[in-house]
Image (cartoon, grey):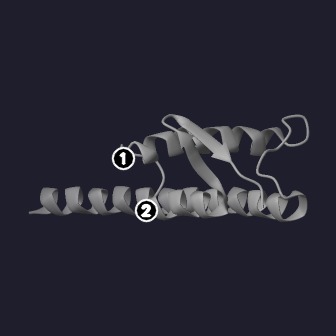
Amino acid sequence: DAKLEEELKKKKARDAKLEEEQKQNVKQWDSVYERLASHKNQTGALDVNKDDDEELFEWIKKQKSILVLYFQKKPIPISIDQARKLTSLGFSQSRPGIIRASGI
């Protein structure tokens, strides 16, 4: 049936677009993560001054809120591997709902 084939084509196109968007999101996340890792290697700290790098400052703030959910075993908008990368870099839960950024 031509109508069914057309619907399948549309679905494949939507799926391909979604997959490409997800790849771009992962690339962008990885890029900012690498900036943070480099900052930590240079300064020994995970905290960034908002005036020095507002984008990285806001990204860190967002990742901390995501990690609160992660430590509460709730759904998170990043992959488990990404959450683990953050914790291996030095983010940890100091007490429920509070994320600490440790230095080296």
Visible in this render: residue 81?
A: yes
Q: Residue at x 36, y 55 (%)?
A: 14
Q: Residue at x 84, y 35 (%)?
A: 50
Residue 73, numbered label: 1
Task: Please tell me whether residue 28 is drawn above or below residue 50 in the rendered image.
Answer: below
Which percent across, then down, holds residue 42? Answer: 89, 62
Give the side of residue 44 with respect to residue 91, left or right: right
Q: Which residue is mark 2?
A: 19
Quadrant where the C terminus sits is bottom right
Disc 1 and disc 2 in contact, CB within 8 angstroms: no
Residue, far front: 95
Q: Amino acid at mark 2?
A: Glu
Which percent across, then down, holds residue 52? Answer: 91, 41
Q: Residue at x 66, y 38 (%)?
A: 61
User: Of helix, strand and loop, which one carries label 2?
Assistant: helix
Image quarter of residue 34: bottom right
Of tags 1 and 2, the one toward the viewer is 1
Residue 53, numbered label: none
Of residue 48 and residue 56, the one placed in the foreground of this image is: 48
Give the side of residue 70 with respect to residue 94, left or right: left
Give the side of residue 6 with respect to residue 14, left or right: left
Neighbours of disc 2 within 10 Å: few (<14), some (14-19), many (20+): few
Of residue 28 and residue 71, the one placed in the foreground of this image is: 71
Image quarter of residue 17: bottom left
User: Of helix, strand and loop, which one carries label 1?
Assistant: loop
Quadrant where the N terminus sits is bottom left
- As measured in the structure, the alpha-carbon distance from the residue carrying label 1 to the one carrying label 2 is 26 Å
Question: Which mark is first along the chain, 2 or 1?
Answer: 2
